């Protein structure tokens, strides 16, 4: 399996961390390709739960190479905190981590503008993670970003001049917003000094990761590309404008790591057995009333790993996963948290939508993010009423659980290759690879 992309199939938080950790056993390299520390990938290691925001989820496997590609936006302070906390937990972080020197940085003003924009949006807020991700990608596209390579020695003066230009604009915007000439300003000197100190510590990890990854693939090594978020948060294909600012789909692995599409041979869609969403925006199969939404939230411990926000919960939405299969070219599905559904009498699957005039939709219209207004069409399946926690063989699953998995697979048109029955590595069923 030379180039394998692991992507979310819904609105993120599907359980990519556990699958990447598991698959890293058979891989040589794991590379993140987009997003930043808005992501929160949860991995259980040595009976402890670790949440990774930037560093790939394969870091707990000794001898494997971790990479942050050029498409990731890196908050240097957050990265160093994560490295320090992993080292304190006894996890090796040294030459096994390489970071693209073409990656754009999340600067302090990006975080300030993220919060300010959300305030200005009021009721129409996106519900961002507040980590400065959107403003960092905006500056990257506007060609006003700062990259690690900008600290190249001997060019300090030129770099500071460019930073000054960028800050001039930020400061004008800030002052006009506060309508106050004394509004706090971002200072070039102070920002430069702090970022340079971060850079000195991060420098040993930096390289041209596109070259590293292509060399690895050329040498027949296996590279796992670890996606963050999910296709419904993709800036092109998600429920715009309630999305993040990067290409979360499998194609993002190529641009975000500098590898060609011919290098990718498998795309695994990580799919929660129900649906969750953090932040604002449409969610047709959301359960807003009654005990079932609360049951999913509590049994699934559905709390955002980055912000601690309670996740919105709902039934499995086959329309969303069908679209994920199309957008990503999925070759296999990993169904996560199946055990969370153990106590339900009846399990619903959203198979389509209708609007108030009775029109039917079997795919997501691009105006859904802006206008909402679609209700799900459900199909009901019997529950299994048996604890699944820890089952490791497909044959041991109750018939109703198998029927549910088969229904999901048929809807997506993609085979199920893995089923998770608990958070631990061993609480996993591997099916024949499709
Ligand atoms: P941002 O990425 O912080 O700009 O947030 C934009 C939207 O994406 C918000 O709805 C966030 O809640 C959501 N989001 C960002 N990262 C994640 C994630 O890792 N999991 C789930 N939702 C996320």
Image: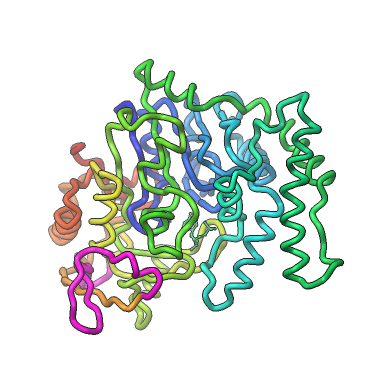
Q: Residue furthest top?
A: 219
Residue 346 lies in magenta, yes or no? Answer: yes
Asked whether residue 278 is in view, the answer is yes
Name the quadrant containing residue 158: top right
The span shown in magenta is 343-371
Residue 374 located left or right of residue 47: left
Residue 350 is a magenta residue: yes
Near-viewer residue (91 or 172): 172
Q: Quadrant of the N terminus?
A: top left
Residue drawn at the location 73% of the way across and 37% of the way down: 198
Image location (x, y in percent) of residue 212: 49, 22
Q: Residue 363 appears at what percent x and percent y?
A: 23, 63
| Figure quadrant of the C terminus | top left
Q: Is residue 405 left or right of residue 183?
A: left
Residue 252 percent coordinates (x, y): 41, 42
Residue appearing at x 38%, y 15% in the figure: 219
Classify 18 as above or below 343: above
Is residue 85 at least partly visible in the picture?
Answer: no
Q: Position of residue 8 (x, y in %)?
A: 36, 50
Residue lying farthest to the right in this orientation: 182
């Amino acid at each position: 399996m030379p180039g394998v992309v692991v992507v979310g199939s819904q609105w993120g938080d599907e359980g990519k961390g556990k699958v990447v950790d598991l698959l890293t056993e058979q891989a040589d390299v794991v590379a993140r390709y987009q997003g930043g520390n808005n992501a929160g990938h949860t991995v259980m290691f040595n009976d402890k739960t670790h949440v990774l925001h930037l560093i790939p989820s394969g870091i707990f496997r000794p001898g494997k190479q971790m990479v942050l590609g050029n498409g990731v936006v890196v908050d240097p302070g957050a990265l160093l905190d994560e490295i320090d906390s992993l080292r304190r937990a006894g996890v090796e972080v040294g030459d096994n981590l390489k970071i693209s020197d073409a990656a754009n940085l999340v600067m302090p003003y990006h975080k300030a503008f993220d919060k300010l924009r959300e305030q200005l949006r009021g009721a129409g807020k996106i519900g961002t993670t507040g980590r400065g991700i959107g403003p960092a990608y905006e500056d990257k596209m506007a060609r006003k970003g700062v990259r690690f390579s900008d600290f190249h020695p001997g060019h300090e003066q030129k770099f500071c001049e460019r930073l000054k230009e960028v800050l001039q604009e930020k400061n004008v915007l800030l002052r006009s917003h506060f309508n106050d000439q004394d509004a706090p300003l971002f200072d070039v000197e102070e920002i430069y000094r702090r970022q340079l100190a971060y850079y000195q510590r991060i420098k040993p990890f930096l390289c041209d990761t596109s070259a590293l990854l292509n060399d690895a693939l050329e040498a027949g090594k296996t590279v796992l590309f670890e996606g963050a978020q999910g296709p419904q948060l993709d800036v092109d294909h998600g429920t715009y404008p309630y999305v993040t600012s990067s290409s979360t789909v499998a194609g993002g692995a190529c641009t975000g790591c500098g590898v060609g599409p011919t290098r990718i041979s498998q795309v695994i869609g990580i799919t929660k057995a129900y649906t969750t969403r953090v932040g604002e925006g449409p969610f047709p199969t959301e359960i807003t009333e009654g005990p079932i939404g609360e049951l999913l939230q509590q049994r699934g411990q559905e709390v955002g790993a980055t912000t601690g926000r309670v996740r919105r919960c709902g039934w499995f939405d086959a329309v969303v996963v069908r679209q994920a299969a199309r957008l990503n070219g999925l070759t296999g599905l990993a169904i996560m948290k199946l055990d969370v559904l153990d106590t339900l009498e009846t399990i619903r699957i959203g198979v389509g939508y209708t609007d108030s005039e009775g029109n039917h939709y079997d795919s997501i219209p691009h105006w859904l993010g802006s206008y909402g207004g679609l209700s799900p069409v459900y199909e009901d399946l019997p529950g299994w009423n048996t604890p699944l926690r820890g089952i490791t063989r497909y044959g041991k699953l109750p018939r109703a659980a198998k029927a549910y998995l088969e229904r999901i697979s048929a809807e997506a048109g993609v085979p199920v290759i893995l089923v998770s029955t608990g958070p631990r590595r061993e609480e996993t069923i591997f099916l024949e690879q499709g």
